[in-house]
Image: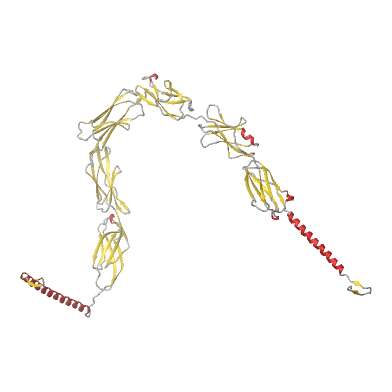
């Protein structure tokens, strides 16, 4: 290797041998590359020679077509169990060459791939199903693939009928209570997804699904005696299932464990409320018993658990006369329960008290009496004087008048009372009595509903602000009772219909309200506005009709009798719409037409209405607008001028005629000009 430094070249002997070896290696590689190139050229020449040699045909690209593919089932589409079934897949393929194309077959059952095979022959594909089972039931299809081209046959359904009889085996035929039994149910020769069912005395006790033809289950029997066990299975073929017949029956004998609970109640022959009861719950076990099981004892009274233990339970309590409920001693041993019960009849020392109120209805702050009493008691054990009574809550403002009797004023709100009877340590409560103090009715108010129109029916409302229902309302006129109505519920109202003929009659009405034994309360007199319907409408014209001339101001005054406010409308014949409308608190008003002209001539009338909604109309008035005086004067003046001019003209005319007459000169028949 030569190393150049500072512009000079030097020789390093340490690298001389490595350089020689590198040159030899490069020469050998060039020789091998030359040999490989020659071999490649020779092979290419040979292939080209064979391709173009006469008598030899090589397909550069062979064409083919899959004409059809058919799947068939042999010997039939419906077969019985254990039949040897063959699935045949036949493909018809057209090809441009003589050699058979390589093909791939795939068999599907219900869209699931079950078999695949590559073949280089044109023979049919055979897929055997030896000893067919119900699980082989389904729709089969065949698919062929040749160099990426695929075709699938139509589906053909295979139905296999017949299931083998299931076989049941038990590991024990005689067992004790609480012992476990292992059962095995087998479906000989069956395949697929299988449901197994176990039955005890024809009642299904277990169901499970497995993917094998056998299921093992463990269970215990709930009662002693003989039990019949059998099983069955069903093969699942979605969406259907096919169930087998019942298996062989096996009888299992269940023996009772010689161990029982014992319940003892120590009391007098006749038990009264308040007596002491001593109760014992124990286990009785036979001497020959060899079964050692953990015990648990439970002593209960109805649904209340009194005590529990392993071998013995004791409990003491005071007897109470309630609904008869059994005492229960329950023994639990694993999965086995043994129960014994006893009922104790307890005689009632005294009956539950009843609480009543007098009077049956009471008003706020009125006196009332509450009575608490037990109707029955055991005279052989207690006397009536030994019974004491109290009221709850204890701070109520009622005073005890004698045993069981309490008196005082009713409260101003609803209140619950309870009575407690007590004797020899026994306490009994009455049912809750709710006192609803009634509210006395307040002074009623009387008013008119809507409008009071003279001569028309209208309604009067009588109502109190407070008061308990029912409330009796009475309408009075001049202290004479007219009608009574009863309001029982809040939505109801006391309404009375009346008619008056004079406005002052409205103040004669009053109403009376009552809801208790006290005197009824009277309202004030009815004070309301009475609407008097309109009458006697008139239409007055100013100035007087003969004096109406052009340029005048016309006033049409409409008046009527009745209660204001009044709405007036003025009309002119030929117009449906009013000329003018106004509402006033007076009984008359006017409509003004300024600067009259001939066009204002016509027939006029007015209408009036008030809150009685009765429309009244005036008589019609015909107005003729005459010519103005100055126009008459002008016309007269013009006429005088014209006449004067005519007179002057006539005078001048006749004068001129007279002046122009001919002159005679004394000779007959001769006329001269006057010269």
Q: Is residue 350 left or right of residue 593?
A: left
User: Which residue, as the protein is rendered here, is positioned at the far bottom?
Assistant: 54
User: Which residue, as the protein is rendered here, is positioned at the far left?
Assistant: 13
- State the residue in front, 508 or 289: 508
Quadrant placement of the C terminus: bottom right
Q: What colour-coding does the image apply?
A: secondary structure
Where residue 101 sits, quadrant-wise, is bottom left
- The spot of residue 404 in percent (x, y) is 42, 22
Figure disc tally: 0
User: Which residue, as the protein is rendered here, is positioned at the far front?
Assistant: 675
- The spot of residue 219 in percent (x, y) is 25, 42
- State the residue in front, 596 or 70: 596
- State the residue in front, 264 or 546: 546
Q: Is residue 653 left or right of residue 407?
A: right
Quadrant placement of the N terminus: bottom left
- The spot of residue 634 in percent (x, y) is 75, 57
Relative height, residue 483 to residue 562 (above, below): above
- The spot of residue 538 in percent (x, y) is 69, 45
Where residue 79 sits, quadrant-wise, is bottom left
- State the residue in front, 92 or 400: 400
Where residue 301 sits, quadrant-wise, is top left
């Amino acid at each position: 290797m030569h190393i150049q430094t500072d512009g000079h070249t030097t020789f390093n002997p340490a690298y001389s041998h490595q350089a020689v070896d590198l040159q030899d290696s490069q020469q050998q590689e060039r020789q091998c590359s030359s040999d490989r190139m020659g071999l490649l050229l020779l092979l290419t020449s040979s292939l080209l020679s064979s391709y173009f040699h006469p008598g030899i045909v090589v397909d550069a690209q062979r064409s083919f077509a899959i004409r059809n593919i058919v799947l068939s089932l042999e010997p039939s589409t419906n077969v019985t169990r254990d039949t040897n079934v063959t699935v045949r897949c036949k493909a018809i393929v057209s090809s441009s060459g003589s050699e058979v194309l390589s093909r791939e077959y795939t068999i599907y059952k219900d869209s699931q791939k079950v078999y695949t095979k590559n073949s280089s022959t044109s023979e049919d594909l055979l897929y055997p199903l030896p000893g067919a089972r119900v699980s082989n039931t389904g729709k089969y299809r065949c698919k062929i693939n040749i160099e990426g081209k695929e075709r699938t046959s139509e589906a053909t359904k295979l139905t296999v009928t017949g299931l083998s009889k299931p076989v049941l085996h038990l590991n024990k035929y005689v067992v004790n209570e609480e012992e476990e039994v292992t059962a095995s149910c087998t479906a000989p020769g069956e395949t697929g997804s299988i449901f197994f069912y176990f039955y005890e005395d024809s009642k299904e006790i277990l169901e499970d699904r497995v993917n094998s033809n056998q299921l093992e289950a463990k269970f215990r029997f709930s009662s002693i005696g003989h039990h019949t066990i059998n099983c069955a299975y069903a093969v699942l073929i979605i969406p259907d299932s096919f169930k087998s017949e019942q298996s062989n029956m096996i009888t299992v004998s269940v023996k009772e464990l010689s161990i029982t609970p014992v319940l003892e109640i120590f009391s007098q022959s006749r038990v009264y409320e308040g007596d002491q009861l001593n109760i014992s719950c124990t286990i009785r076990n036979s001497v020959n018993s060899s079964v050692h099981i953990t015990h648990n004892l439970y002593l209960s009274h109805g649904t209340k658990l009194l005590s529990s233990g392993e071998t013995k339970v004791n409990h003491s309590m005071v007897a109470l006369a309630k609904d008869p409920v059994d005492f229960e001693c329950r023994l639990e041993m694993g999965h086995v329960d043994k129960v014994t019960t006893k009922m104790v009849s307890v005689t009632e020392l005294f009956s539950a008290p009843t609480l009543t109120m007098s009077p049956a209805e009471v008003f706020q702050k009125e006196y009332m009496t509450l009575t608490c009493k037990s109707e029955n008691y055991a005279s052989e054990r207690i006397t009536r004087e030994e019974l004491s009574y109290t009221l709850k809550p204890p701070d109520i403002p009622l005073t005890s008048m004698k045993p069981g009797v309490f008196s005082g004023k009713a409260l101003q709100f609803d209140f619950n009372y309870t009575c407690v009877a007590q004797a020899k340590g026994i306490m009994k409560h009455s049912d809750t009595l709710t006192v609803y103090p009634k509210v006395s009715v307040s002074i009623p108010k009387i008013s008119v509903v809507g409008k009071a129109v003279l001569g028309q029916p209208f309604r009067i409302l009588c109502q109190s602000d407070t008061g308990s229902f029912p409330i009796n309302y009475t309408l009075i006129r001049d202290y004479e009772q007219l009608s009574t109505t009863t309001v029982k519920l809040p939505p109801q109202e006391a309404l009375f219909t009346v008619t008056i003929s004079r406005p002052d009659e409205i103040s004669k009405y009053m109403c009376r309200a009552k809801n208790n034994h006290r005197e009824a309360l009277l309202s004030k007199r009815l004070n309301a506005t009475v609407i008097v319907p309109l009458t006697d409408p008139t239409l007055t014209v100013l100035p007087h009709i003969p004096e109406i001339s052009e340029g005048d101001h016309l006033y049409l005054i409409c008046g009527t009798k009745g209660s204001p406010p009044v709405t007036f409308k003025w009309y002119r014949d030929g117009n449906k719409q009013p000329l003018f409308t106004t509402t006033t608190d007076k009984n008359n008003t006017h409509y003004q037409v300024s600067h009259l002209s001939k066009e204002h001539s016509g027939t006029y009338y007015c209408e009036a209405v008030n809150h009685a909604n009765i429309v009244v109309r005036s008589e019609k008035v015909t107005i003729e607008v005459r010519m103005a005086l100055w126009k008459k004067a002008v016309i007269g003046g013009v006429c005088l001028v014209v006449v004067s001019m005519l007179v002057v003209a006539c005078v001048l005319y006749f004068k001129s005629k007279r002046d122009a007459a001919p002159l005679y000169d004394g000779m007959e028949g001769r006329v001269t000009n006057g010269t």
